[in-house]
Amino acid sequence: MNIVLIFLITIFSVSLFFYGKSKTKTISIKDNIKLNALPKFYGYYLVLWCSIPALVFLLVWSLFEPVIIKSIIIETAANQGAIFSDKNEANLIYEKIKAIHLGTYFGDIDSILRESALAYAKFINLFTNSKVVLIFGIIIASVIYSLKKIKNNNKARDDVEVILKGLLFVSSLIAILTTLGIIFSLLFESIKFFSVINIFDYLFGTNWSPQRAFVRDASSITAAEFEELKDAFGFIPLIAGTSFIAFIAMLVAVPIGLFSGIYMAEYASIKVRRISKPIIEILAGIPTVVYGFFAALTVGPFFRQVGENLGLTVSSESALAAGLIMGIMIIPYVSSLSDDVINSVPQSLRDGSYAVGATKSETIKQVVIPAALPGIIGSVLLAVSRAIGETMIVVMAAGLAANLTINPLESTTTITTQIVMILVGDQEFDSPKTQSAFALGLTLFIATLILNYIAQRAVKKYREKYD
Amino acid sequence: MTKEERLKKRHRAEKRFRFYGLTSIFVALLFVVILVQNIFSKGSSAFKKTVITTEVFFDQELLEIQNGASQEEIMEADFYDIMIENLIKTYPAKDRDEEDELLKLFSGDAEIEIKKAFLNDNNLIGKTITLDLTASDDIDQLHKGNYPRDLPEERRRISDFQLVIYDYFVENKKISKNFNNYFFNNGDSRDPELAGIGGALVGSFYSILICLLLAFPVAVLASIYLEEFAPKNKITDFIEININNLAAVPSIVYGLLALQILLATIQLPRSTPLVAGITLALMTLPRIIIPCRASLKAVPPSIREGALAVGASKFQSVFHHVVPLALPGTLSGTIIGLAQALGETAPLILIGMVAFVVDIPSSPVDPSSSLPVQVYLWSESAERGFVEKTSATIMMLLSFLIVMNFIAVYLRQKFEKRWN
């Protein structure tokens, strides 16, 4: 239906374009008046008026129609005596009604379901008909309005440009809408979560075992259950595990990345630089699931084997394997950024140092690096924020059980791993377990935001210093 | 310490420092080589499959259909007995147990493969043809040498008797390797020998297509606005800060966004390329806007002023002159953004693309998988055969990424004008 409507709108628009173009031409010849714009702009003007309001309406309608129909149908089903205790059962009944309507349901159909299916058919019909009527109404109204405008010889080019400029502005607002969407969706569930779990229990608890809260409705929780849940959502082991793996990653990425960056900026010939820089950047372009596969199937077992030979017990999901591979992934972030930063240190500083007899490495260590330090710290912080937000490597190579440890050979878990583990597969939407994933997401979002903010400030300050 | 000694020491320090830098680059390059080599050595065997050459006799009595039967009749017909009858003839087995072990050497699709041969030529009743039937995963891995046969029997998935049959097949040249069409055509399967990336390829294609259709126009329009039209004020600054921050938000957060808004609130269908495409578009948008703006910024003001001077409106100067000149940079930024989206896994897992989907999706609203999610799914499987399948999927994924990046670099180098 929607495709037919879009097709019709397109046809109307195209024909209105030619109509507007020729109409204004004939008017200008017949009445011998000078047009305020080229004839084609009158065509564009009509096209914009014909299509934009109708398409916007169609989009908004399509977004809300299923939700509204669903709530109406569930209500009618309840009125007819359907029994469901929570949202999931209601959803199930709704899916059944829909399937009956489409003729794809093969289970037993009782009278309630049959009646509801009939009501569903009725509402679908009603909604579709009113959608079509409203869209045509909108098209007719806007076309009448715009036709009147062009007959009065409006400044069509200016008007078209104003509308287009509005479109451009709206496109740039999508970024803000996305941010709002993220904040809204994270906050919404997190607030529900924190109404059950005390925020301090969450922030300072040392035990993370969300499976205890599985399949439990947050709204109808008993006091005994509440006590039990109280210490199931302690954030400390997760942030410890996340920081620990990120720390191992930085131990790998910072020295290698920094030294490569320095070498490429200060020593490498143009030829070496031109070959090695893109190859190192390949590391940043490889999908993280590939690293995860490599860590889980090659590096993890390899470390365990080595550990066995040395007489150590190494978990096959050790923090070391995950951290090492994550570090490799992050090398190019550190090397490229520090390369850029070092390159923008003014040559005069180096020349001054050479002039008093310093060697190249002494110049780098005592002049270039101190000068570039804020930028380097910024790039390292950006890399840290990558590391704590990285998901696939830790999901595949790090452990699942929250484990407060500083032994790199044991397994630990991370924030992102827990989010995936909680949300993978079917979830109960109202259980604190599911909501905890959103609280974790919110925490992650805020943490990366702060890190990025500091990093960007540091890099920007540094750039301004030498501009 | 004399002057000379001090100087020598300093020069040694210089050499050491240089050596550290060179070593770091070398280590980073080594990681690339190890990673790629590891994947390729594990994955390249997946493009071939092991087949067992079998004589198939179509017995009228067992088949119960006539020569020249219609498509529907053949589809309805039971080829199970024909399959059993012919497969046990491949090796002189002594009793039922041995026959069972023999049958386990063939894939679960042997019946369908025989049926397909009959569908191609429905005059085969009473005739014998030679078919290459797909071998089971265990035989496949054994034949490819991925499976050690010198383990004790209880630690092997293949029994001693099956090894005897295998050796008999090898001796009689009945076993060989063919191009693995299943890997490209089939959807997911629990049997490694039948599992393929067909569904994941289509799913990824739809997701990326939707991502492109949504993200590219919006990103281009937004960057044109911000670069060319936006007044310098608080709102513009706010939008800019927003875009920079969004580009650094961890991808999994977009998964949470999609789960809450697209699935729970708007109720789009779960596990579908449609939702995946929208999610990836939201994620890719800021990552495309940043290079788009850079390429618009690189067009010198003289171009704009020239157009304005001959009477073009601001819009005409931008759309007729600036945008076409910035297009190569814009396109290459978009392709690189799409390449990142193609490899993205975490948000897709949250929107349910980890579901086990056998069918190849026929539209963007059918449940499906995607290439990186398929890698994740198979890497969690215990069967040996999935290791090579996973690696081969990674090879496919990496080759798509290489091609996309290559196109991006080519576009930029070939068409981008340098203004000096």
Image (cartoon, coloured by chain):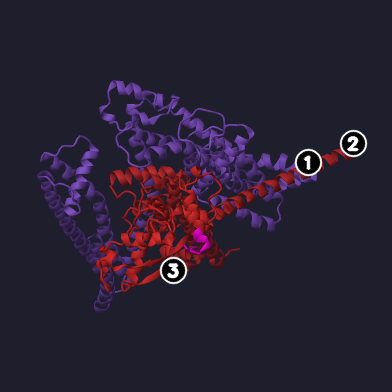
Chain colours: A purple, B red
Are both tags, 1 and 2, on one chain? yes
Q: Is residue B405 rendered magenta in the image?
A: no
Q: Judging from the image, what secondary structure is the residue with disc 2 in?
A: loop
Q: Amino acid at mark 1?
A: Ala
Residue tagged 3: B311
Q: Amino acid at mark 3?
A: Gly
Q: CA distance from mark 3 to mark 2?
A: 77 Å
Residue tagged 1: B13
Query: Measured from the top left, where is residue A242 in percent x and y?
Result: 50, 34
Q: Is residue B66 left or right of residue B206?
A: left
Q: Amino acid at mark 2?
A: Thr
Disc 3 is attached to a residue of which chain? Answer: B
Q: CA distance from mark 1 to mark 2?
A: 17 Å
Query: Measured from the top left, where is residue B417 in percent x and y?
Result: 56, 66
Residue A467 seen in the figure: no
Label 1 or label 2, whichever comes before in sequence order? 2
The foreground one among A247 and B98 is B98
Residue tagged 2: B2
Q: CA distance from mark 1 to mark 3?
A: 65 Å
Q: Judging from the image, what secondary structure is the residue with disc 1 in?
A: helix
Are both tags, 3 and 2, on one chain? yes
Query: Measured from the top left, where is residue A167 in percent x and y?
Result: 35, 57
Label 3 or label 2, whichever comes before in sequence order? 2
**First to last magenta residue range:** B168-180
Disc 1 is attached to a residue of which chain? Answer: B
- How many C-alpha atoms fall within 10 Å of the one at disc 3: few (<14), some, or many (≥20)? few
- How many C-alpha atoms fall within 10 Å of the one at disc 1: few (<14), some, or many (≥20)? some
Q: Name the residue rendered at 41%, 27% in the picture.
A: A202
Q: Name the residue rendered at 31%, 23% in the picture.
A: A225
Please determine whether, in this image, residue A379 is positioned above or below residue B287.
Answer: above
Q: Quadrant of the C terminus of chain B?
A: bottom right
